[in-house]
Amino acid sequence: MSSRCRRRGCVRVVGIVAVLLLAVPVVVRGQSSGGVSIAQKLDGPAPDIAIPLEPIRTVFSQLEQKTGLRFVIDDAVMDFMPYGEQTRIAVTIRHTTVRAGLARMLDGLGLVMRFEGGAVRVEPGAVLRRLGRRLTAAQLGLLRRLAAQPPDNLAATPGVVPLDLRLSPKGDPRAELERVLKQIHAPNALRALEAACDTLGWVWYPEEDAVVVFSRKEDVRRRLARALDLDFHRVPLDELLVTLGQRAGVLVRFEPGALGKIAASQRRVDLTQRGVSVRQVLERICGNTGLRYEIDDEGVLLRGPTSEAIGPTAASIQQWVRIELELRSGVKMDVFLRQDQLPPDLHREMEQKLREVLKPH
């Protein structure tokens, strides 16, 4: 190890795992066993730690023995690791505090830590949650390069990784990024990129061989396109929409009074489908209820129906038709079709039934 490395305190994370950013403010509360606070343990000098390639949970168990801290690994962590529970990592920590050593190790895994109930809780960081799926080997390599390089190398030509700025052609996005990067103090290129994008209102994703940068609005669109498995029964419409947003990582807001403008019978929803995107569900709900939605930098805004869309007419109520299919015993699926997709005989029967229901008594 070089004298420069000894002065700074080096942490090496080796293996197939991603190296990701995520500088997260740390709030320390409570005490660990033996009356020694977590803060004291974190800010004390770390013992020399060298853990060979082992499964992630085994590594954290060994860290507990060497640091005296207790770790709780969020269940979602393994969903992002390339081989789940079998992902193996090696860790080396020397010449630094426990806090700095852990932070650098977790950066290398795309994870963050927070403290609760006398334990260190390990959770997926922002980049993993944006990605929303398991990392590929190529993405791992790209993230490791970012984390291993100083911030100055990010804007260099050629840079540590290719930058694909998929942004509005207005102005010069690359020049803007370089300007902001000069004002940021970060330990590595990955953290600098996260901070710069946050400042500029952008988001970034690791792709196979490049960092791709989008506007926040485009990021919302990408999240809405994720496929989900849904199973809701008689759920209030607002609860359904908020839950869908949470699962996609998108904030769902409502225009004041929007839901009060739709029929009471449409404010509870049955929805069971596999592999459907949040945007498809939004389209179907809006088609059925007359609600409208807009995508912006903050997420999705639901607006009430227009005056033309309100009224108990066959056209407004039956824009979509729900058909229940029984795939096999005990397994059912709802399929939504537009009226014009129905066979002519079924369409005529539906119109007849609808007229009977709407006939004044």
Image (tube, rainbow, N blue to C red):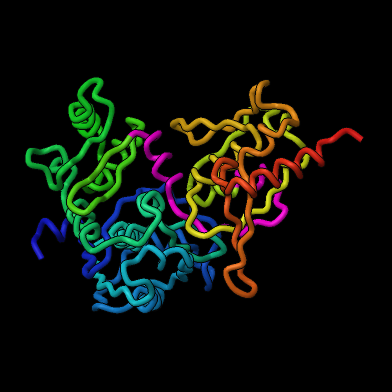
* Nearest to the observer: residue 205 or residue 52: 205
Give the residue displayed 26% in from the left and 70% down from the top: 91
Q: Is residue 346 left or right of residue 276?
A: right
As drawn, the residue found furthest toward the front would be 345
Residue 155 at what x, y percent from top left?
15, 37
> Which corner quadrant of the image does residue 320 belong to?
top right
Regarding residue 84, the answer to whether it shows in the image is: yes
> Which corner quadrant of the image does residue 324 belong to?
bottom right
Give the residue displayed 40% in from the left and 68% down from the top: 78
Residue 27 at what x, y percent from top left?
48, 51
Regarding residue 97, the answer to whether it shows in the image is: no
Q: Is residue 263 magenta?
A: no
Q: Is residue 278 left or right of residue 195?
A: right
The N terminus: image quadrant:
bottom left
Residue 181 at what x, y percent from top left?
22, 34
> Which corner quadrant of the image does residue 174 belong to?
top left
Give the residue displayed 70% in from the left and 47% down from the top: 349
Q: Is residue 240 magenta?
A: yes
Magenta region: which residues?
Answer: 215-242
* Nearest to the observer: residue 45 or residue 187: 187
As drawn, the residue found furthest toward the right would be 361
Q: Is residue 327 above or below residue 201?
A: below
The C terminus: image quadrant:
top right
Q: Is residue 16 above or below residue 250?
A: below
* Nearest to the observer: residue 322 or residue 224: 322
Give the residue displayed 48% in from the left and 50% down from the top: 277
Total labels: the figure holds 0
Residue 21 at what x, y percent from top left?
30, 51
